[in-house]
């Protein structure tokens, strides 16, 4: 079977107030991309949301509309989401990543993706464009995935897109943003906290609740275990 994976990340700048970063991904059968994109775009227009869908745009005025976008995800059996959480306060860049934060970032991207790549399937991986210091980051990530899955699955391509032109990529941004914001903390009784609570309600568990494995389920949230020795 062929799959498309829309990837996005949130709070990955290493700022002191952003202790946790999330790297998220929306997975769907490639055969359903056009249909689901059209349905999501139609929903967005019907509820009066114009422009790009982003976690940063969640507001009291738009809360109900954003809840409907979240509902779209949970009501579509073919859509699944996986994110990993990284405690940036425990990153030992010198010991494990040669002092290169960007290299460490893409290593975590690899961990997020590789665990959901299933034998005999084909994957098109789409990352939101990010200006990197290293010109070969994307090709290196693809090569690492190909080497790890060689003989059991296929990476048809791993490339970048402009998420402003892709509704489903924006849905991935929304979910990844909610995860990171919940773990970093935000004021209670705000539009963002209420939307995060609604996601948890539909998920059946708070966004603070992580899964113990990379089991392929509707909404998998895994926290990377980093130990300071």
Image (cartoon, rainbow, N blue to C red):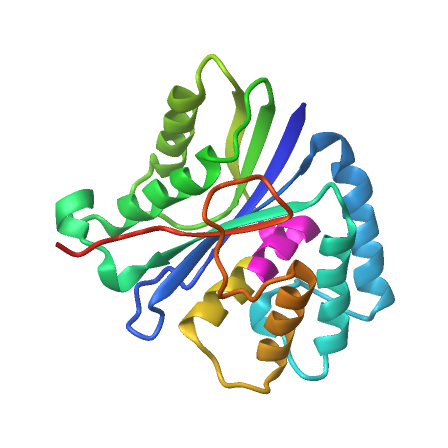
Name the residue located 39 percent from the left edge and 23 percent from the top edge. Answer: 148
Q: How many marks?
A: 0
Q: Is residue 61 above or below residue 226?
A: below
| Residue 80 percent across, percent down from the top left | 64, 45
Residue 149 in view, yes or no: yes
Q: In this view, does 156 lie above or below 14?
A: above
Q: In this view, does 222 lie above or below 149?
A: below
**Image quarter (top left, top right, bottom left or bottom right) of the C terminus:** bottom left
Of 151 and 197, the residue lying toward us: 197
Q: Is residue 198 above or below residue 23?
A: below
| Residue 140 percent across, percent down from the top left | 35, 31
Name the residue located 44 percent from the left edge and 16 percent from the top edge. Answer: 150
Q: In this view, does 128 lie to the left or right of 59?
A: left
Examine the structure image and report whether residue 146 is included in the region drawn in magenta. Answer: no
Of 172 and 81, the residue lying toward us: 81
| Residue 30 percent across, percent down from the top left | 70, 32
**Image quarter (top left, top right, bottom left or bottom right) of the N terminus:** top right
Q: In which quarter of the image is residue 50?
A: bottom right
Q: In which quarter of the image is residue 199?
A: bottom right
Residue 133 in view, yes or no: no
Name the residue located 78 percent from the left edge and 44 percent from the top edge. Answer: 36
Q: In this view, does 123 lie to the left or right of 1?
A: left
| Residue 73 percent across, percent down from the top left | 72, 54
Q: Give the range drawn in magenta.
A: 162-175
Mostly what secondary structure, the magenta segment? helix
Extreme-top residue of the structure: 151
């Amino acid at each position: 079977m062929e799959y498309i994976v829309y990837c996005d990340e949130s709070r990955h700048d290493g700022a002191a107030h952003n202790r946790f970063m999330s790297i998220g991904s929306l997975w769907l059968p490639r055969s359903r991309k056009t249909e689901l994109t059209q349905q999501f775009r139609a929903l967005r227009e019907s509820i009066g949301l114009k422009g790009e869908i982003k976690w940063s745009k969640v507001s009291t005025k738009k809360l109900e509309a954003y809840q409907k976008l979240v509902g779209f995800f949970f009501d579509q059996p073919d859509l699944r989401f996986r994110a990993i959480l990284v405690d940036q306060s425990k990153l030992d860049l010198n010991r494990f990543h040669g002092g290169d934060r960007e290299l460490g970032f893409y290593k975590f991207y690899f961990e997020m993706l590789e665990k959901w790549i299933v034998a005999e399937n084909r994957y098109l991986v789409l990352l939101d464009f990010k200006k990197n210091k290293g010109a070969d980051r994307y090709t290196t990530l693809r090569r690492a995935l190909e080497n790890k899955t060689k003989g059991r699955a296929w990476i048809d391509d791993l490339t970048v897109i402009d998420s402003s032109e892709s509704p489903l990529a924006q849905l991935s941004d929304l979910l990844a943003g909610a995860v990171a914001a919940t773990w970093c903390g935000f004021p209670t009784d705000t539009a963002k906290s209420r939307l995060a609570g609604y996601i948890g309600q539909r998920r059946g568990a708070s966004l603070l609740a992580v899964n113990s494995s990379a089991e392929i389920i509707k909404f998998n949230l895994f926290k990377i275990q980093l130990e300071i020795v």
